[in-house]
Amino acid sequence: MSQTRTDSAAAQAAIRANKAKKRKQFIRALFSRKIVLVSAVIVVLIILVALFANQLMPFDPNKPSVRDRNQGPSAVHLLGTDEFGRDVLSRIIIGSRVSLIVGVLAVVIACIIGTSLGMIAGYFGGIVDDVISRIAEAVRVIPQVVLAIALCAVFGGGIVNMSIILGISNMTVYIRMMRSQVMSIKERDYIMAGRLQGNSNARLMLRHILPNSISPIIVTMTQQIGGTILSEAGLSFLGLGISTPTASWGTLVSGGRSYLLTNPVYSLAPGVCIALLVICLNSLGDGVRDALDPRLRGEL
Amino acid sequence: MARYIAQRLGQTLLVLLIVSFLTYMLVDFLPGDPIAAMTGGEISGETYERLYKEMNMDKPVLVRYALWLKGALTGDLGTSQSYHRRVVDIISERVPVTIYFSLLAFVISVPLGILFGIISAVRRGSAADTAVTLTANVCCCLPQFWLGILFMYVFAMKLGWLPSSGFVWPHEDLLLSIRQTIMPLLCLAIGGIASITRQTRSSMLEVIRQDYIRTARSKGLRSKAVIYVHALKNALLPVITLMGLRLGGLIGGSVFVENVFVIPGMGSLLVNAITSVDIPLIQGCVLLIAVFSCVVNLITDIVYVYVDPRIKVA
């Protein structure tokens, strides 16, 4: 009896060591390409800016000042001021929060709804699968921008509603991925063994199937954050997403377009921020995918 | 084959039915009173009652859905509350404009994207590859609306070469039309070229690694023949999927460009419909866009069976 216990302890230590080794390998593979490293640094910087926005902002982003309306860039207002005399740089800094929060929250919502539905469809099959798959297909045929715009009418703007809207319009990918993953995993022997032991469906799904099918889901999540941020900016630009006075990069681009002649930076600078963040997030996502794919890591 | 097509057609019809139901129900959840929105609220109680009956608001939602669907099938999507015209008439004015831009952008971006993709895949690791890949990755992430504003600032305001916005058809004023088309078209095409380049490159690289390419090379075929005959044929399959997706999203895909350049197309119509809570118009727009994308999906699937014999016709 005691012999088996030491055995299993040794085995667990070996598994842990193996996991640590894998993690180290993953990190080395991830940052082996310079562009991924640079992207990671920039993303971290943007996150820090969002976290310490209150310390970094030179002015109150929401405080209007009649005297300072529509100024071009100057030593006081580095990126000029908007039509209410608010400091554009401060508004860009605080706007980073909206992009990051909505980007992450929407992807998490999409993932939770999508994987649950996909898992249920794949696990139970039959009519449940038919219903979920058909609805997912119906949602998928509506182009994503159009779906998000239509949902804006129902949910309205705001950070949480935006996340829900973008979550719903992104979820079908997870439904399809999870469904096909589960369908192949549920036929494996260890699931059968688990079932024979008398485990409930819920336990089998959450404890055994989910952990074994999660890694492609995580890759998809990292790759979707950038696109989601882009969608949020787009909806806010159209005036359907985050509404004033909250600053978001999309609304800033839209707000500045009437003042292109007096202060082009007002409209163009937040767009550069959107592009920079999305480019870095996407190349980070590609890096994660490549690092997790053994074929590209040179192991196969 | 006929059976496969029939089966896919059946699936498409089912999906469309679900889409129409979801669209109807979704919009039905909208806050606000449609009659008040239509009339501006200043009507007597009797008129309200009459309109209430006329718009079938007294009937259960499923009955209303059935009536709406019946109308949609016969080409009647109701009357817009903000334009006070038939939804079908408004849409049929707007659709050609959007198709004009999107189709032009599509026609430009497909050959260019495939060309760049091949160049960078064949010369993997070269300076050309790095330049193409980097540019494509960056262009994929540029917000379309921002690109539009940038172009507008540079070409219309600073250089004064092009008009900053507006739309006329080529047969109305050819020169003005061309000048007005350039910037929106560039905005639409850049993203398309970038994503097709990326897809072509990655699927070319995938194919080049396959055994039959090595076989073709080792039996002494010229490398041009290997690339353009053997590799490209197979590498283009995923590109066809992407093309289908882009074509399917064509009617709804130019929302931002239409907004920036004040083009009276479907995208700006949809946004107007949403901001003015014009329920029949929203339903009509979403339904039409979904039908279009469904039909394109169906066609893509059928084309796929022809070009890829590996797909089993069940």
Image (spheres, coloured by chain):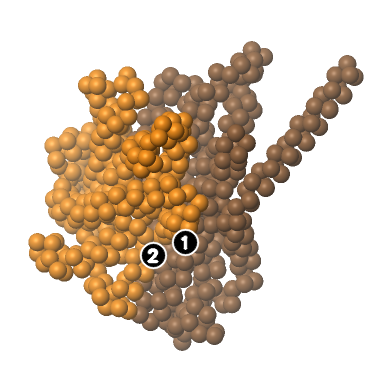
Chain colours: A brown, B orange
The residue at 55%/43% (across/down) is A289
Q: In x, y percent, where is residue A57?
A: 59, 73
Q: Is residue A243 at all visible to an observer of this figure?
A: no
The residue at 57%/77% (across/down) is A59
The residue at 42%/71% (across/down) is A268
Q: Is residue B155 at all visible to an observer of this figure?
A: yes
Up-down relation of residue B194 to residue A131 (above or below): below
Q: Which picture quadrant has residue B63?
A: top left
- Residue B146 circle label: 2
Q: In x, y percent, where is residue A127?
A: 41, 21
Identified by mark 2, the residue type is Trp
Q: Tell me the quarter of the image containing the C terminus of chain A.
A: top right
Viewer-side residue, B312 vs A55 = B312
In the picture of the structure, the residue carrying the numbered disc 1 is A275
Chain name for mark 2: B
Identified by mark 1, the residue type is Ala
